[in-house]
Image (cartoon, grey):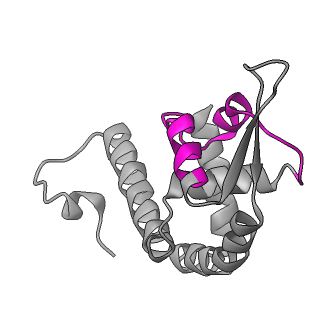
Amino acid sequence: MKDITEILKTKTSLPLAKKTVLNVSFASNHFKDGILSVLKPHDISIEQFNVLRILRGKNGEPSNLKDIQDRMISKMSNTTRLVDKLILKNLVERFTCEKNRRKVDIYITDGGLKLLELVDPIIEEKENELTNNLSKKELKTLNLLLTKMRG
């Protein structure tokens, strides 16, 4: 297993804080690439997958753009654009309230639910594959440390 300095091909010693930030960033990209590789054949991005999971979690109740944005893992995502793309794929629906045009309800469709049913086990398998070098105890410790880092 290569150290981050070997991966980056640097000859200089890195300060521990920098090494940690680079390591976490590199690992994050590794995880994203892994998850994206299993979503790509289903023509869905990680952010779109995240929106679908948020809407499924509403159990048939409507959501709105602000609620979805607040729950997104990546706060930089353009939620309106993501929802528009999911509408074009018939995975979500948007309804505007006739009495209050500013009130917009967003629902997951049966197609969206079916896609999640298909993709969920593939994602779980990939997540297990991405973390299989660590024991359960190490995974718990890592989660604790990452939570602590986010402070």
Q: Quadrant of the C terminus?
A: top right
Query: Residue drawn at (56%, 37%), measured in percent from left and top?
Result: 79
Relative vertical location of residue 94 with respect to residue 126 in this rendering, above or below: above
Query: Residue drawn at (29%, 59%), measured in percent from left and top?
Result: 4
Q: How many labels were placed on the picture?
A: 0
> Does the magenta run of residues contain 65?
yes
Check the image and name the residue furthest to the front: 98
Q: Closest to the observer: 110 or 101?
A: 101
> Does the magenta run of residues contain 100?
no
Rendered location of residue 101, percent (x, y): 74, 20
Query: Residue drawn at (44%, 71%), measured in percent from left and top?
Result: 40
79 relative position to 36: left or right: right
Rendered location of residue 56, percent (x, y): 79, 56
Give the extent of the magenta segment. Answer: 59-87
Relative vertical location of residue 65 with respect to residue 58 in this rendering, above or below: above
Query: Residue drawn at (89%, 54%), measured in percent from left and top?
Result: 59
74 relative position to 135: left or right: left
35 relative position to 150: left or right: left
Rendered location of residue 119, percent (x, y): 63, 75
Location of residue 88 by image quarter = bottom right
Q: Quadrant of the N terminus?
A: bottom left
Q: Closest to the observer: 39 or 14?
A: 39
